[in-house]
Amino acid sequence: MIDKIKNLSLWKRLGLIMAIAGPGIITSNVDNDAGGITTYSLAGSEFGFKLLWSLLPITIILVVVQDLSARMGTVTGKGLAALIRERFGAGITFYLMIGLVFTNLGNTIAEFAGVAASMQIFGIKPVISVPLSAILVWFLVLKASYKVVEKVFLWACLFYISYIISGIMVEPDWGATVKTIIDPDNFDLSYEATIMVVALVGTTIAPWMQFYLQASIVDKGLTYNNYRLVRWDVIIGSVCVAVVAFFIILVCAITMYPHGIIIEDASQAALALAPVAGYYASTLFAFGLLNASLFAACILPLSTAYTVCEALGWEASVDLRFSEAPQFYVLYAMMIILGAGIIMIPNLPLIPIMYFSQVLNGLVLPVVLCFMVLLVTDEQLMREARLGRLGMIFNWGVVVILSLLSVYLAWVSIF
């Protein structure tokens, strides 16, 4: 099939990409969640345009890491958790799952916090918005097939355009913006800027992404014959993430940085836009936060259910009925109930919870990446799709860089 693709016209190739598109685009865009939008907003409001350069290397690394999952999923037809269990044993997999469950729970809490904060901007109280959103995301996966769920998620990806529109509405001076980005004198290498760059990396490349991407590729039934098209899906998704991140940073750099406006989260960024950029720009920013939070509140519990069920050898698929995969749906429901329920606790210290989840992200990611490279370089497992020497060296280099950055982020978050 790969040889046949080479002979197709451009439009037919695009048609095939659209038919296969989903796992890569969805996984990458979900990473622009409440935590991600908050991080991008802080980067723009505190450092202006000075950190926009970091989006290029981050995008390249994201493509490389996601490609490993795409390669393994299409070749083996198995999820990452299942491969880790088969190759490294149940004991290691058990402890890895504990870390992932707690990490994903912390992130899920953050997503429902994003839902509550964004809906408050529109005048809806958390006591109403959080339970309704929890029921919505639970009902979607419980009652719909994989094809329907994927279509809903792809439509959700389109709403990220609200940030691009917000960026256009603040009327940036594109010439001056480009000059500022590429001017070496504007590169901020201070301690605070370094911490923010590490945070940008950490919020863009998370452990759950690798498990969800591979699981969704398997659930969709894609094989190695589809690998080249799946790779394009991954590339497109990664570029979309970078574009959205660019406009969020741009908006905050133009409207907040010159005025010294200090924010702590994305909802404050949306409110701060109103007096500077106008009501509609503020509303679009808030709508983008709501969409991103709801979107991620669907995916993170789903990723957890996929991962744990694969690790323990249980059935895991959106296409299966509850009676065929009870553990899968119970895990999904539990993550939603816990994530939404904890948000309803009065005076909850959300900032420490979000910090703790980021610390776990930083500690778990290097371990997951090591497993991935060991698996993708396994000749017996990957056969003709095994990474070559150059690919292996490059990917181990990426693992080392991300591991150092993740451990550094975890260290800074704790101390």
Image (tube, rainbow, N blue to C red):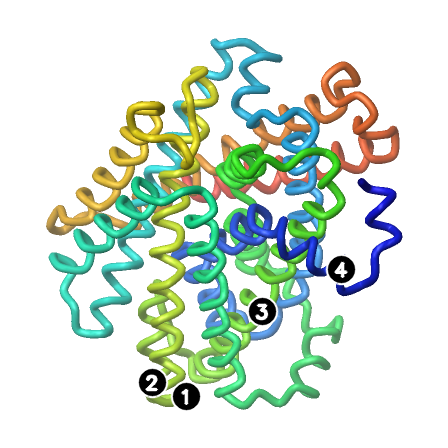
Please identify, in this view, whether the residue under mark 4 or under mark 1 is nearer the observer: 4
Which residue bears the numbered disc 1? 277
* Label 2 Cα neighbours within 10 Å, binned few <14 / some 14-19 / many ≥20: some
* 3D distance between C-alphas at marks 1 and 2: 6 Å
Viewed as shown, does residue 89 lie left or right of 401? left
Q: Find residue 24 and report its horizontal and vertical position in percent.
A: 59, 48
| C-beta proximity under 8 Å, tags 2 and 3 | no
> Percent from the top left, x then y, of residue 268?
32, 70
Q: Which residue is mark 2?
A: 274
Question: Would residue 400 be seen by someone viewing this image from the given angle?
Answer: no
| Three-letter residue code for mark 4 | Lys
Q: Which residue is mark 3?
A: 246
How much space separates mark 1 and mark 3, taking CA atoms? 17 Å
- Residue at the (54%, 73%) spot, across then down: 247
Task: Tell me if residue 157 comes above or below residue 393 in the rendering.
Answer: below
Find residue 57 and report its horizontal and vertical position in percent.
Answer: 70, 55
Residue where numbered disc 4 is placed = 12
C-alpha distance separating marks 2 and 3: 20 Å
Could you tell me if the residues under marks 4 and 3 are in contact, i.e. CB atoms within 8 Å?
no
Residue type beneath disc 3: Phe
Residue drawn at 47 percent across, 22 percent down: 310
